[in-house]
Image: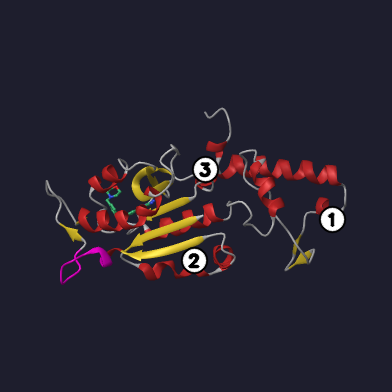
C-alpha cells in the first residue's frame, strides 16, 4: 500500500518510523511519503492561508498549493489502465465535519492500494479542493472525523487513522490470530486481562482464570464483556431505552 501525506507539519509524522507501521515500512509492505504543502507555494512567504469569503473567524487554506500538491501525487493514479474503472486512490481529508472514523472504515481503507491524507490547519481547506479532487477519474474523496472533539489540525487524526488501517493491511501484523479474533467481533467491549503474578499489591487475579476450566473461563469472560459494556458503553447494546 502507498500512503502520501500532505501537511504543513511534516515533522509530526516522525512517529510513523516507530512500531508496527515502522516495521511494515521497512519490510516494503507500506510505502509512506510525507510532503510539505509549502513546497507547492510560489511566493516569498510560502503562504498557505487566507481570510474566509463571507467573513468569520480564523483563516482558510488556499486552494492553489493543494491543487498543485494533489496534481503531483495523483499523477501516479492517472497512469493506471484506462480500462480499469475502479477507484485507484482514496483522498482522506480529516475534518471535524466528516463522517465518523470507525473500524469498518479502517477495514475498507486497508483494501485500497493508494491513500492520500490531506491534513488541514487553521479553519480547514477551501471546499473546492475536495470538490475538484473528486472529479478526477479513479479518485474518491472522503472527509472523515476522528471523533467528536476539536483538534488543531488533521495531522493527529491522520496518524491515528494510518495506525488503525496499517495494522489491517494483509500480511502486515505480527500476530494474525489477534486479527481473526477481531473480525469475529460481537460488538461488546473486551473482558479484563491479567498476567503474573497472581497476587499483586493485595489485588488477586479472579480465581476462575487460575482453574483451567476453559468453558467456565469463556462464560466468565463473556459475562464481563456484557457487564462492562452495559456500564460504560450502553449505546453499543441492542434495545436502547
Ligand atoms: C482537520 C483544521 C482545526 C478547529 C471550527 C467549528 C469545528 C477546524 N475529530 C477531529 N477534531 N478536529 C479535527 C480536525 C481539526 C482541524 C482540521 C481535522 C483542520 N482543524 C479546526 C476548529 C474548527 N469548529 C465548530 O465545530 C467544530 C475547524 C478532527 C478530525 N479528523
Answer with the quarter of the image where residue 227 lies. Answer: top right
- Looking at the image, do the residues carrying marks 3 and 1 touch, with CB atoms under 8 Å apart? no
* Residue 158 rendering spot, x and y as whole percentages: 42, 56
Q: Where does label 1 land, which residue?
A: 210
What are the residue bounds of the magenta stretch?
38-47
Give the spatial CA distance, label 1 vs label 2: 39 Å
Answer with the quarter of the image where residue 226 lies. Answer: top right
Residue at horizontal 62 percent and vertical 41 percent from the top: 188
* Residue 152 rendering spot, x and y as whole percentages: 32, 59
Give the spatial CA distance, label 3 vs label 1: 39 Å
Left or right for 200, reference 68:
right
**Residue 67 visible here:** yes
Of labels 3 and 1, the one closer to you: 3
Q: Is 159 or 216 nearer to us in this picture?
A: 159
- Farthest residue, direction left: 54
Left or right for 19, reference 125:
right
Secondary structure beneath dot 1 equals helix
Residue at horizontal 71 percent and vertical 55 percent from the top: 193
Task: Identify the disc placed on residue 16.
Answer: 2
Task: Identify the disc placed on residue 108.
Answer: 3
> Which badge, 3 or 2, comes first in the chain's sequence?
2
**Predominant secondary structure in magenta?**
loop
> Which badge, 3 or 1, comes first in the chain's sequence?
3
Question: Is residue 16 in the magenta section?
Answer: no
Residue at horizontal 27 percent and vertical 42 percent from the top: 131
Of labels 1 and 2, the one closer to you: 2
* Residue 21 rendering spot, x and y as whole percentages: 55, 63
Amino acid at each position: 500500500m502507498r500512503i502520501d501525506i500532505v501537511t504543513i507539519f511534516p515533522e509530526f509524522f516522525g512517529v510513523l518510523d516507530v512500531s508496527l507501521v515502522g516495521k511494515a515500512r521497512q519490510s516494503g509492505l507500506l510505502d509512506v511519503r510525507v510532503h510539505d504543502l509549502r513546497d507547492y507555494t510560489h511566493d516569498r512567504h510560502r503562504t498557505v492561508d487566507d481570510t474566509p469569503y463571507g467573513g468569520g473567524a480564523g483563516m482558510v487554506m488556499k486552494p492553489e498549493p493543494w491543487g498543485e500538491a494533489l496534481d503531483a501525487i495523483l499523477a501516479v493514479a492517472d497512469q493506471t489502465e484506462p480500462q480499469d474503472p475502479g477507484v485507484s486512490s482514496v483522498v482522506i481529508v480529516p475534518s471535524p465535519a466528516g463522517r465518523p472514523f470507525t473500524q469498518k472504515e479502517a477495514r475498507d481503507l486497508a483494501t485500497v492500494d493508494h491513500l492520500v491524507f490531506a491534513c488541514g490547519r487553521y479553519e480547514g481547506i477551501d471546499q473546492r479542493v475536495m470538490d475538484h479532487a473528486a472529479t478526477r477519474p479513479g479518485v474518491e474523496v472522503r472527509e472523515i472525523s476522528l471523533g467528536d472533539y476539536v483538534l488543531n489540525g488533521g495531522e493527529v487524526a491522520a496518524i491515528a487513522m494510518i495506525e488503525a488501517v496499517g495494522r489491517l493491511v494483509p500480511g502486515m501484523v505480527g500476530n494474525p490470530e489477534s486479527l481473526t479474533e477481531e473480525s469475529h467481533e460481537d460488538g461488546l467491549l473486551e473482558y479484563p486481562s491479567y498476567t503474573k503474578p497472581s497476587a499483586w499489591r493485595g489485588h488477586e487475579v479472579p480465581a476462575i482464570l487460575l482453574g483451567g476450566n476453559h468453558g467456565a473461563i469463556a462464560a466468565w469472560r463473556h459475562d464481563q464483556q456484557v457487564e462492562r459494556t452495559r456500564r460504560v458503553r450502553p449505546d453499543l447494546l441492542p434495545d436502547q431505552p
